[in-house]
Image (spheres, helix red, strand yellow):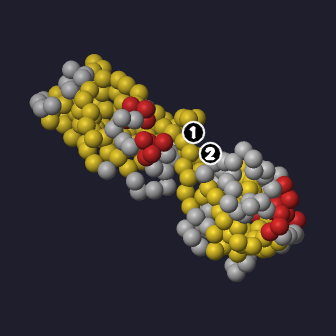
Amino acid sequence: MLAAFVSCGQRAGDANLPESKEAKQLLQGMWCDKETESVVFLMKGDSVYYPDSTSMPAYFRVYADTLYIGSTARYHIKKHTEHLLWFTSGDGELVKLVKDDDAADEKDAFDHHNTPVLSLTDVLKKDTVVSYDNRRYHLYIAVNPTKYKVSRHTINEDGLDVENVYYDNIIHLSIFNGATQIFSRDFRKQHYQQRVPAQFYDQAVLNNMEYASIDEKGIHVDVSVCTPGDASCYLIGHIISFDGQLSTELLEY
């Protein structure tokens, strides 16, 4: 069946290289791990669907002996027949799949029509009262999910690149001294674009804000910009002076 593929030496980016329609047709259907029998993905039309309902569908195509999924992932095909697919995953492992033609199995595994966009938090409100130099200050922090989407690519347990989409947050901070408001502002991820690496920024969300301390400089709050589903975060410190001036510094990674 490898005769359906074009020369291995050509690349998908070559304008003279046609997509292998025969190979794409053979890939249609649900594919399972040969050893564990767990579902890996469903090929339907031009799209790949994953059994994890939080993973976004991706466009796929075949050029020569390479399977392309999404905009960046590519997998070298080692063997392909109507019911057998072997390819090398992103971590170099040989993935051996068999096709499951049972329509009932497909329905059970892919009975979800809309992939949910993940919100890391519900609306989170925090009130904090602190004192300094015989004055009381009241902080209101509200972490508000938005409809701004952030995509993150990860490698799943089958060695495949998958995309999850998350909602970003806007964080509001208000500070009062008695009845007098000395500070009010909405913080967005864009405010920190110059303080974190571009590659990290593109897949990160504005995660949280916490009161840290108070001293002669003012009120200290810490903001975290994090990669969803990972422990990677940048911590940015803000100082709000008692006359409402804001200063910022990168605290740690």
Q: Which residue is mark 2?
A: 117
Residue 236, given in percent of the width and then of the height, sits at 31, 41
Q: Earlier in the sequence, mark 2 or mark 1?
A: 2
Secondary structure found at label 2: loop
Point out the frontmost of discs 2 and 1.
1
- State the residue at coordinates (24%, 23%): 245
- State the residue at coordinates (69%, 48%): 14
The image quadrant that residue 69 belongs to is bottom right
- State the residue at coordinates (77%, 68%): 31
User: How many discs appear?
Assistant: 2
Give how far apart the Cα atoms at labels 2 and 1 are.
8 Å
Would residue 147 be found to the left or right of residue 211 on screen? right
Residue 82, given in percent of the width and then of the height, sits at 85, 70
Residue 112, given in percent of the width and then of the height, sits at 76, 54
For residue 193, the mark is: none
For residue 149, the mark is: 1
Contact (CB < 8 A) between labels 2 and 1? Answer: yes
- Foreground: 215 or 138? 215
The image quadrant that residue 95 belongs to is bottom right
Q: Amino acid at mark 2?
A: Val
Secondary structure found at label 1: strand
Q: Residues within 10 Å of mark 2 (few under 14, many from 20)?
A: some
Residue 202, given in percent of the width and then of the height, sits at 48, 42
- Foreground: 228 or 80? 80
Quarter occupied by the N terminus: bottom right
Q: Residue 16, relative to residue 22: is it above or below?
A: above
